[in-house]
Image: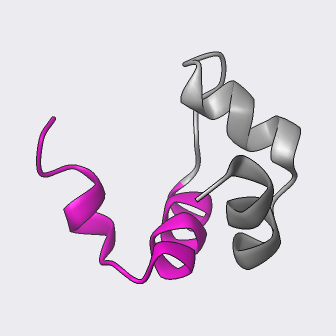
């Protein structure tokens, strides 16, 4: 999935997602939940490999 698709599905800005991916921003819990929901997974699953 592209950043643009994820942005559309999550309701977040594409540039914001890019900066999160690059580690330039801290992300709030609400935005973690939005991303997980857009991906169809639980928030816990985002952190399984961390």
Q: Is residue 4 above or below residue 25?
A: below
Q: Residue furthest left?
A: 49
On the image, which quarter does residue 43 sit in? bottom left
> Residue 24 location in percent, x, y?
65, 16
Q: Residue at x 47, y 73 (%)?
A: 39
Q: Residue 28: give x, y in percent of width and height.
A: 58, 50
Tell me where residue 7 sits by quadrant.
Answer: bottom right
| Residue 47 in the image, given as x and y percentages of width and height | 22, 49
**Residue placed at 87% from the left, 52% from the top?**
13
- From this view, report whether residue 47 is shown above or below residue 12: above
Depicted 12 relative to depicted 37: above or below = above
**Which part of the image, by quadrant, shows the N terminus?**
bottom right
Relative to residue 13, is residue 22 drawn left or right?
Answer: left
Most common SS among magenta residues: helix
Q: Residue sitting at 42 percent across and 83 percent down?
A: 40
Viewer-nearest residue: 48 or 8: 8
Coloration of the structure image: one colour
Horizontal side of 28 relative to 2 (left or right) equals left
Magenta segment, which residues? 29-50
Q: Quadrant of residue 25?
A: top right
Q: Quadrant of the C terminus?
A: top left
Q: x, y percentage for residue 6? A: 68, 63
């Amino acid at each position: 999935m592209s950043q643009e698709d994820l942005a559309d599905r999550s309701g977040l800005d594409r540039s914001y997602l890019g900066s999160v991916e690059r580690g330039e921003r801290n992300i709030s819990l609400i935005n973690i939940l939005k991303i997980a929901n857009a991906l169809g997974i639980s928030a816990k699953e985002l952190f399984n490999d961390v």
